Amino acid sequence: LAELYQPKKYTPAVIEFVDIAGLVKGASKGEGLGNKFLGNIRATDAIIHVVRCFDDENVIHVEGSTDPKRDIDIIDLELIMADMEMVERRIDKALKAAKGDKKFMHEADVFKALLEHLNNGKSARSFECDEDDAEKIATSDLLTSKPIIYAANMDEDGFANKDGNRYLQQVKELADREGAQVLPICAKLEQDIAELDGEDRAMFLEELGIQESGLDRLIKCSYALLGLISFLTYGEDECRAWTIKNGTKAPQAAGKIHSDIERGFIRAETINFSEMIACG
C-alpha cells in the first residue's frame, strides 16, 4: 500500500519485547537481580522463556549442565512463589472486606483454592474455574497466568537436526502438557542473519532451508499468542497498520483510530482486495 500511495509517513505494526537477564534460584526472595526483574515481567502481556538446548563447554551454564526441564522448573518455581505472595495478599484483602460485605467470602475462597493449586507447583494458567472467577483472578496480574512461548535455543547442528535434538523434545513434551508454544531458534544463526541485507539475507535463508528468520517467526508467534491482528489505513498523509484483538468488530476497530469514528460509525463497505487492486 505504501508503494501504491507514496504517503508522507509509513507506520508498521509494533510489538515490543522486553529483554531481561536470566532469573536464578531464589529470585522471588530477592536473589540475583530478583524482584526488580519479576516486576518487569509483571508489566508484560506474555512471557517468552528462552531455554538452552545445546552443549558447549565454552559457554558456562549457571547450574553446571544442560537440562531444559530443570531450567524451566527453576524459573516456574520462582514465578509461582512470587504469585503465591500476591494471592496471599488478595486473600487477606478479601477477608477484611468480607467483614462488611459477605459477598467477598466467595472471592476469598476462590483465591484460597488458587493458593493451594500454586502450592502444588502448578501455574495459574492451569487453574480451572468459571468465567466470573477467572475475571477476578485476571485482576491480580499473576506471572504464571500469562501465556508463554518457549524459545528453544539450539546450536547450528541441533537446529539443522531438530527431530534428533533430545533437548528440544524435552521442551516440546513439557509445553504440550501446559498448552504452550515452542519456537526452535539458533541465536548464532540469528546473529548472522541480522548482519545481512536484501538479496544476501534471502540467499542465506534459502541455503539454511528456512523461509524467514527466527525473529520474524517470534513476532508472528507472539502476535498469534496474544490473539492480535492488524488492519491497515492509507492515504496521502500516512499508511499505517493498527493492532486490534482478533474478532474485533469494524466500529470498535474504527474507534482505535479515533473515538469520533466509532461514535459516528454508519456502515462498512467490503470488497475483496484483489478486486480493489484490479479496479486500480
Image (cartoon, helix red, strand yellow):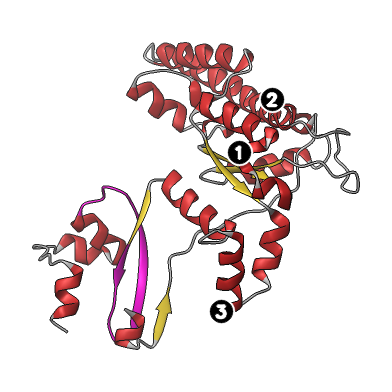
Q: Earlier in the sequence, mark 1 or mark 3?
A: 1
Callout 3 amino acid: Glu
Which is more toward the observer, 205 or 262? 205
- Residue 99 at least partly seen: no
Q: What kind of residue is marked 1?
A: Asp
Q: In the image, which disc is placed on residue 227?
A: none
Q: Residue at x 38, y 51 (%)?
A: 228
Q: Nearer the viewer, mark 1 or mark 3?
A: 1
Residue 243 relative to residue 194: left or right: left
Q: Is residue 246 magenta?
A: yes
Q: CA distance from mark 2 to mark 1?
A: 29 Å
Compared to 34, does 3 lie above or below?
below
Front-most of 207 and 68?
A: 207
x and y percent of residue 164 in the render? 65, 37
Give the number of the disc on residue 77: 2
Quadrant location of the C terminus in the rendered image:
bottom left
Disc 3 element: helix
Q: Give coordinates of residue 256: x percent, y percent.
A: 31, 61
Q: Nearer the viewer, residue 237 or 274?
A: 274
Query: Which residue is painted at 16% across and 75% down in the image?
Result: 276
- Give the extent of the magenta segment: 231-249
Would you name the residue on which mark 1 appears? 163
Dot 2 and dot 3 residues touching (CB under 8 Å): no
The kind of secondary structure element at disc 2 is helix
Q: Dot 1, how many residues are within 10 Å of its Cα: few (below 14), some (14-19), or many (20+)?
A: few
